[in-house]
Amino acid sequence: MRTRILKADQEGRNYAIDEAAFLLSNGEVVAFPTETVYGLGCNALDNQAVEKVFNAKGRPSDNPLIVHIAKFEQIKLLVREIPDVAAKLAQMFWPGPLTLVFLSSGVAAKSVTAGLDTIAVRIPAHPIALDIISKSNLPIAAPSANRSGRPSPTEASHVLFDLDGRIPLIIDAGKTDLGLESTVLDLTSKIPVILRPGGVTIEKLKEVLGEVALDESVLTAVDFDQAVASPGMKHTHYAPRAEMIVVCGETAAIVRKIIHMAQGFLCDGNRVGILATKETASEYPESVYVLAPGSRFTPQIYAANLYAFLREFDVLGVDIILAEALSTQNEGLAIMNRILKAAGFRVVDAD
């Protein structure tokens, strides 16, 4: 299969949207940008189309997909009931990086929900994504457009690297804005539960809902045999090729510990990468590869660059990555969730 790339710039936008909608309406898959990461979309009602997504990604069949819609009214087809709080959340955060989990109506393809009785839905904020969904007039199931387990793509080039020859079309609209996937909030329990943190923080959700719970899988590993209602909860995700270790503690102690660990790995003949911050990057020796996605005080910038920097470590050919832990306040919770998942929850205490 030849993978085409169409630029969704001012000149090519309409043609790119028409081509994407045509393929989606005819049972094919298309990679397109959202405000979070690039997604690999298909008709959420078509079992064969959904299987093409799983096959292209090499995605485990028990990992559910998020369904993207263009208007709130489209949700009625997909869910069994709409809690009052859903309309309130939609008014506040849609279009945007918030996915809501409902009881499923059963109309979506079985593999979209991984056989569960729940379904995850959101309205993306990216204008190209919205136009493609609207033009196709379909609910679009769309996980991230990468090989399963790899860092999610924030640029069309990342999609091409992972899926070249596996999918027919990539819509290129440049770098995504947020860089981390949406927050997934389960509305099927008495107290809404965050299954995956993302662009809408727990602090913002509490302002609207009052009480919000955090699933234990956000910062700790879960049982591999456990069924999960959201992507990003169980399987290896966001991982570079190198082994990754997260070092936790007070910042100065983290730096000292990483320098000590790096020296040991270097003595064993390893190429060492360090995932640092702007504040600490200059403290590490020249014998290691230091990448700093952003500052500890600007987590939005750090988040936007994280996946691209994890992919850069692959290009550098490092054998081991030592990552500084960050605060879990606000956007830091989503960042730490992704870093811990990428490291397979391999954590070292700096103290």
Image (spheres, rainbow, N blue to C red):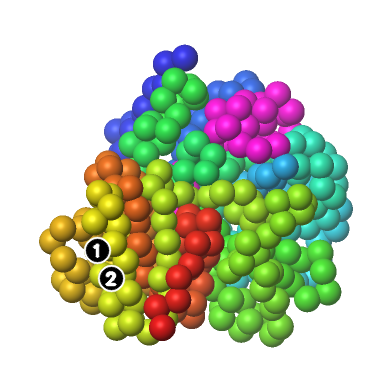
Separation of residues labelled 1 and 2 (CA atoms): 5 Å
User: Mark 2: few, some, or many residues within 10 Å (few <14, many ≥20)?
Assistant: few
Residue at left offset 45%, top offset 70%: 348
Q: Can residue 204 be seen in this view?
A: yes
Give 214 or 130, whichever is nearer the viewer. 214
Image position, residue 339 (x, y; %): 46, 61
* Residue of label 2: 260
Helix or strand or loop: what does disc 1 sit on? helix
* Span colored in magenta: 34-61
User: Mark 1: few, some, or many residues within 10 Å (few <14, many ≥20)?
Assistant: some
| Circles 1, 2 touching at the beta carbon (< 8 Å) | yes
Against 52, residue 303 (above or below) is below
Please state if 101 lies on the left or on the right of 142 as rendered: right
Image position, residue 302 (x, y; %): 34, 66
Q: What residue type is labelled 2?
A: His
Residue at left offset 49%, top offset 77%: 328
* Residue of label 1: 263
